[in-house]
Image: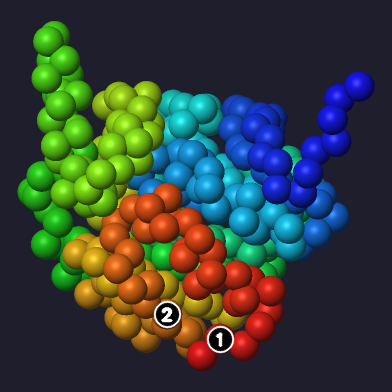
């Protein structure tokens, strides 16, 4: 006889959608309020591996692999943020989830902004973690700039070391296991590693972010050199949003400090007042 599955036990599955299969991880009671977790580029739902069980006692947690990443289907063309958001809606439809709280980190936060602005009936609450702010000035600044994580495959495997060294400064010393998980996701997507970054750089966030009306919490690790300077800017464009810095958190705060990350967002997801 199979042992009963505990509330925090994480299961992996695929959901059939009109365009292909989407891979996701899930835990928690099926009848509980749903929380959708969206990862950064070029990660997968593995980024939330240690977060999922911590939320599963109170929520039906679903962490998806963004289309084109992880084990989800690969679209026939390069995607924009709008395409990634439609993939998330397709997953919610396929799982029979009419409305969810949405948590997004880095690229996942940009996708979450699109979801909340364009599909307000599907997003009950919103957590934006380490979101960039991309307006006309930022799009111009990013033109011609080297693309994060992009490397050219080499016969001797030198690109693997290049990927490792390129991200090493953004992971805590003494935690090569976290960097190994990043590397596994990055190598899996190959040339598509740049797609999510390019989609963010082309996104017209200023046209959508002000349309968000659901309760919103904006968080960021104070040691994230890319997003922490944008924390207050992002929040200022969302009426009624609440800001919460995460002391010491870096670019990889989700898997670097899962307990601290969950502590920062858990009460908000439960509908509690946030200072």
Q: Looking at the picture, does residue 87 appear above or below residue 15?
A: below
Furthest-right residue in this view: 1
Q: Is residue 52 left or right of residue 193?
A: right
Q: How is the image coloured?
A: rainbow
- In this rendering, is residue 262 above or below 168? below
Percent position of residue 133, x then y: 29, 69
Q: Are marks 2 and 1 in contact (CB under 8 Å)?
A: yes
Q: Is residue 231 left or right of residue 218?
A: left
Secondary structure under badge 1?
loop
Label 2 belongs to which residue?
Answer: 244
Residue 187 badge: none
Of the pair 35 and 260, the residue shown nearer to us: 260
Splitting the image into 4 quarters, where does residue 42 fall? top left
What residue is disc 1 on?
274
Q: Residues within 10 Å of mark 1 (few under 14, many from 20)?
A: few
Horizontal and vertical percent for residue 81? 41, 51
Which residue lies at the image location 42% right of the left edge and 65% below the top edge? Answer: 129
Mark 2 and mark 1: Cα distance apart in space = 9 Å
| Residue under the point 35% across and 36% down | 177
Q: Is residue 128 left or right of residue 166?
A: right
The N terminus, quarter of image: top right
Circle 2 packing at 10 Å, graded few (<14), some (14-19), many (20+), is some
Residue sitting at x 62%, y 28%:
21
Q: Earlier in the sequence, mark 2 or mark 1?
A: 2
Q: Which element is circle 2 on?
A: strand
Toward the front, the furthest residue is: 174
Q: Nearer the viewer, residue 258 or 194?
A: 258
Taking 272 as reference, is 227 above or below it? above
Give residue 184's position: percent from left, percent from top. Answer: 36, 28
Q: Which of the 4 image quadrants contains residue 268? A: bottom right
């Amino acid at each position: 006889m199979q042992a009963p599955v505990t509330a925090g036990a994480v299961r992996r599955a695929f959901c059939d959608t009109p365009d292909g299969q989407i891979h996701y991880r899930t835990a928690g009671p099926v009848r509980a309020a749903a929380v959708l977790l969206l990862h950064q580029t070029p990660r997968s739902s593995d980024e939330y591996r240690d977060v999922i069980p911590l939320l599963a006692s109170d929520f039906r947690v679903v962490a998806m692999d963004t289309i084109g990443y992880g084990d989800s289907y690969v679209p026939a063309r390069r995607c924009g943020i709008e395409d990634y958001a439609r993939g998330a809606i397709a997953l919610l439809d396929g799982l029979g989830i009419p409305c969810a709280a949405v948590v997004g980190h880095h690229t996942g936060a940009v996708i979450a902004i699109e979801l909340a602005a364009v599909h307000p009936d599907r997003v009950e609450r919103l957590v934006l973690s380490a979101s960039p702010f991309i307006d006309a000035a930022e799009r111009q600044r990013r033109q011609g700039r080297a693309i994060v994580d992009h490397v050219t495959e080499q016969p001797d495997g030198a690109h693997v070391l290049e990927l490792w060294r390129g991200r090493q400064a953004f992971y805590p010393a003494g935690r090569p296991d976290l960097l190994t998980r990043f590397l596994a996701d990055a190598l899996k997507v190959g040339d598509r590693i740049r797609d999510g970054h390019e989609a963010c750089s082309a996104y017209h966030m200023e046209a959508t972010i002000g349309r968000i009306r659901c309760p919103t919490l904006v968080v960021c690790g104070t040691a994230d050199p890319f997003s922490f300077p944008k924390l207050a800017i992002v929040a200022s464009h969302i009426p009624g949003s609440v800001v919460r810095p995460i002391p010491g958190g870096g670019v990889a705060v989700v898997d670097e400090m899962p307990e601290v990350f969950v502590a920062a967002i858990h009460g908000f997801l439960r509908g509690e007042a946030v200072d």
